[in-house]
Amino acid sequence: ENNRLKEALINKRKQRQRGKPLLLKAPLEYNRGALQQQQKEEKLALRKQQKEQKQAMLKERKRMRLAAKEIR
């Protein structure tokens, strides 16, 4: 990801400089749709993990409240 971002910035700089060729050829393995799909899957996995952590935290809070209630 960072390499492609750097390449894009270099291309932008080259574009501004007159008389220098642009490096606008996409890499052979370049497939924008697959990249976007992968990013979407990563976001979904992260969201799922965050939900699971929140559920675990809520269960722990509930357990602690019940334990505190029994002590009283």
Image (tube, grey):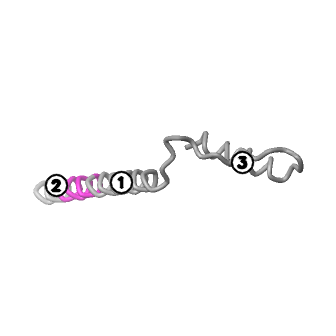
Q: Nearer the viewer, mark 1 or mark 3?
A: 3
Work out which residue is located at the far right of the displayed protein and give it.
Answer: 18
Residue of label 3: 9
Q: Nearer the viewer, residue 49 or 38?
A: 38
Q: Nearer the viewer, residue 31 or 13?
A: 31
Q: Nearer the viewer, residue 10 or 65?
A: 10
Q: How many marks?
A: 3
Amino acid type for the residue under numbered disc 3: Leu
Residue of label 2: 63
Mark 1 vs 3, N-terminal side: 3
Most common secondary structure along the magenta stretch: helix
The residues bearing labels 3 and 2 have C-alpha atoms spaced at a distance of 53 Å
Location of residue 1 in the rendering, given as x and y in whole percent from the top left corner? 55, 43
Location of residue 49 in the rendering, given as x and y in whole percent from the top left corner? 30, 51
43 sits left or right of 53 in the view: right
Location of residue 65 in the rendering, given as x and y in whole percent from the top left corner? 19, 59
Tell me which segment is drawn in magenta.
53-62
Amino acid type for the residue under numbered disc 1: Glu
Q: Looking at the image, is 47 positioned above or below residue 27?
A: below
Q: Secondary structure at mark 3?
A: helix
Mark 3 vs 2, N-terminal side: 3
Q: Determine the residue positioned at 49% across, 41% down.
A: 29
